[in-house]
Amino acid sequence: MALQLPAAFKDRMKFLLQEDYDRFIASYDHNPYSSIRVNTLKISVEDMLARSPWQLKPIPWCPTGFYTESGARPGKHPYYHAGLYYIQEPSAMAPVEMLDVRPGDKVLDLCAAPGGKSTQIAAKLNNEGLLFSNDLNPERTKALAKNLELYGVRCGIVLQEHPERIAGRFPCFFDKILVDAPCSGEGMFRKDEDMIRQWTNESPAKYAVMQRDILASAAKMLKPGGRMVYSTCTFSPEENEAIIAGFLSDHRHFHVEVPACSELFAKGETIRCKQAEENRVIPDDIWEQVEHTARLWPHLIEGEGHFLAVLQHDGSEDDRVLQIEEVYPPAQAGSGHLHDKNKSRSARGFGGSKKDKVSSKSATAEQGAAALAAYGEFIKKHLSFPPAGYTVVYGQHIYQSPLPSTALDGLKVVRPGWYMGDAKNGRFVPAHPLATALHPQEFCRVLHLSVDSGEAVRYLKGETLDVEENRIICFEGTAAKGYVLICIDGCSAGFGKWQDGRLKNEYPAGWRWTSA
Ligand SMILES: C[S@@+](CC[C@H](N)C(=O)[O-])C[C@H]1O[C@@H](n2cnc3c(N)ncnc32)[C@H](O)[C@@H]1O
């Protein structure tokens, strides 16, 4: 075993696993597994299998997840830049599969960055419903927002908030909540040696305090009859079974559901956990439930170490909570309103800098109305459908949001919705995330580039391309000149602007292909 595991960690694992310890330690001789999850917002699993440059082997607990063959470099392929798949560790795909997300659900991903599980939830929503993706870490929240944009999410809101503050605004609101908690990361030691360096014998107890608080806040936001999944990528029972046992003791209106695919996973570890929790009186019926939690052990499955618990609220339909449309009746795209930034603690648009931002004072009602009118015109001329939800304007940035901006007042908002573009001098300039969330048939001008011809990579590098007029596919009555949706092997990747045989590249500088 080449990895230097901390002695205290090995002692803990010996106590936890007993006769299975040797098999567990032998798993560190195996390379970590590599896998991708197909982004069904952009491409079907069948189509991805048909055009995959690598051999793909199904992951048993995730119908859209596939192991990649050794030597595959999925991060260096144009399909990655077009958001066709997310590179995600196999075990990390399990929690969302157990959340049972359906189109139309209101879902909260409370510890979401960098967005692996949020993009998985979004694919299950199929852009119908609402996804709140929150994380406390500002840097990680930027990566989260970028990933949601790359993967074509239209119904997402990104927050950077303390869970308790969100709970204050959205009590009993969500149908489904994922708490993929910050943890000591023991299950990731094989994949990421940094996690070993950061680990100390005190880490599990330190994280357990945070996990208890985050889960308690989450419970306040779940509607009666709703479902939560709690997950970690660590082995210590203090952060796993003990958190669930404590939670059930304090929340008797929840029970643990046996997860789907339970036959593939090991049961929760209650014997050792009970011994460790001997100072706390936890009734036997709770320990029986804790057994229904699941452990993904690296010596038993092809993936890294994970834990998950499905927590079902016992409430009934009688405890029905108002639906979004009842609280906030839908409005037409382009008929939104200016957001008063003084009421929001922050709102940064994609690519926006402080310099770019129009202060709420200078963004007068007149300018706001002009911006909205230009946006409405653009939508009518260029899109085949009216985007759902509310049009909200933060400074010069225009978003289409599943909620009106007043619903988010007082919260630290990173993205209030689908970023459509900017109002500049009375004009509307479309933004990159508008393009990445569109399907080819939804935009008035489309240019298809193929990976095989090399044009896709040239576009992703930011090059200007020579393109004959007859290659621009237009809606009836639309001229070839103007904004064009660029698709790579049929999936949207960004915008270009066509005129007189030249395609000006609108792919953002910060996203460009830099590989050789
Ligand atoms: C395991 S990671 C989440 C991984 C993510 N779910 C994914 O699939 O990409 C845990 C995250 O919790 C965030 N975090 C830490 N404390 C938090 C808190 N009190 N509230 C919300 N998020 C928190 C961390 O910044 C970190 O990004």
Image (cartoon, grey):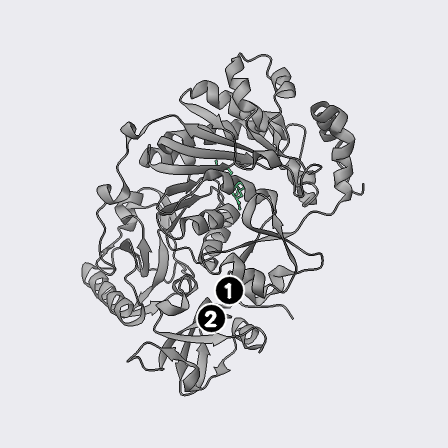
Dot 2 falls on a residue whose secondary structure is strand
Residue 4's spot in the image, x, y percent? 77, 39
Please report the residue visible at 48 percent of the width from the left and 35 percent of the height from the top: 229
Above or below 426: residue 280: above
Q: Nearer the viewer, residue 325 or 466?
A: 325
Q: Nearer the viewer, residue 33 or 65?
A: 65
Dot 1 falls on a residue whose secondary structure is loop
Residue type at tag 1: Ala
Residue type at tag 2: Cys
Above or below 21: residue 384: below
In the rendered structure, the answer to whether residue 292 lies left or right of residue 314 reads right
Q: Nearer the viewer, residue 490 or 191?
A: 490
Mark 1 sits on what residue?
Answer: 82
Mark 2 sits on what residue?
Answer: 487
Please report the residue visible at 36 percent of the width from the left and 82 percent of the height from the top: 480
- Mark 1 is surrounded, within 10 Å at the Cα level, by few (under 14), some (14 to 19) or many (20 or more) other residues, namely many
Above or below 175: residue 357: below
Which quadrant of the figure contains the N terminus? Answer: top right
Q: Are marks 2 and 1 in contact (CB under 8 Å)?
A: yes
Residue 177's spot in the image, x, y percent? 43, 37
Work out whether mark 2 precedes mark 1 in sequence or the reverse, and give the earlier one: 1
Residue 233's spot in the image, x, y percent? 60, 37
Regarding residue 204, the answer to whether it shows in the image is yes
Regarding residue 114, the answer to whether it shows in the image is no
